[in-house]
Image (spheres, rainbow, N blue to C red):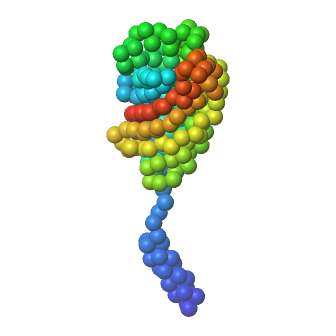
Amino acid sequence: MKSSIFAIAALVMTIGLSSFVGVKTKKDVVNYTVNAEKSRIDWIGAKKGDFHTGFFPIKSGSVAVDGGKLKGGKFVIDLAGVKVTDAAGDRLTGHLKSADFFDVAKNAEASFEIATVNYTSESAADVTGTLTIKGTAVPVKFVVNVRGADDKGFFGQAFLTIDRTLLGVNYGPGQVSKDVQLAIHIFGTK
């Protein structure tokens, strides 16, 4: 009888204590489809005494999020869709599409795939991945700022500088800067 009372008391205590301990639930990874109408990569390229601005559309892609945190993703960049947004317009756009730069007749697309994501704050993460342009794959590292990852969608931004010559884009040595400034804007929906 005494052992039954102890067993019941132990059971009651276990149930009572477990009610104060939070139950952890595993959330599934949410995959967002990139919104190609809103997502893009803005660029600024410089040359002696001047600079040019423009963008590349993001053709397609996906972003993986777990518990509101970016976990991975991959994107297709539309090189053939490059646009120049300054006065050089169509003339420079044509030159960028030529073999001097992206050779879009042979390489209409580029890709980027995330390899690792390490959060440094609530909304900023160091991202590493592989950027492939013109058949050349280069490791890239940058900081992503996740502006939103919820039921309404995903929005992330990154700002970085890349050496275009590492990607086989070698036109104008000494005249055109090797460094290109990029601002990446990725929007996704479920």
Q: Quadrant of residue 41?
A: top left
- In the depicted structure, whether residue 104 falls above or below residue 168: above
Labels in figure, total: 0
Q: Residue 159: x percent and y percent? A: 46, 37
Residue at 40%, 14% (x, y): give it.
88
Q: Quadrant of the C terminus?
A: top left
Q: Is residue 137 visible?
A: yes
Q: Quadrant of residue 175?
A: top right
Q: Which of the pair 41/93 is nearer the observer?
A: 93
Residue at 37%, 19% (x, y): give it.
86
Q: Quadrant of residue 162?
A: top right
- In the depicted structure, whether residue 67 falls above or below residue 52: below
Residue at 41%, 18% (x, y): give it.
84
Q: Is residue 55 visible?
A: no
Q: Residue furthest front?
A: 49
Q: Residue 149: x percent and y percent? A: 40, 43
Residue at 49%, 23% (x, y): give it.
48
Q: Quadrant of the N terminus?
A: bottom right
Q: Residue 52: x percent and y percent? A: 43, 22
Q: Which of the pair 2/29 is nearer the observer?
A: 29
Q: Residue 113: x percent and y percent? A: 57, 32
Q: Residue furthest left?
A: 152
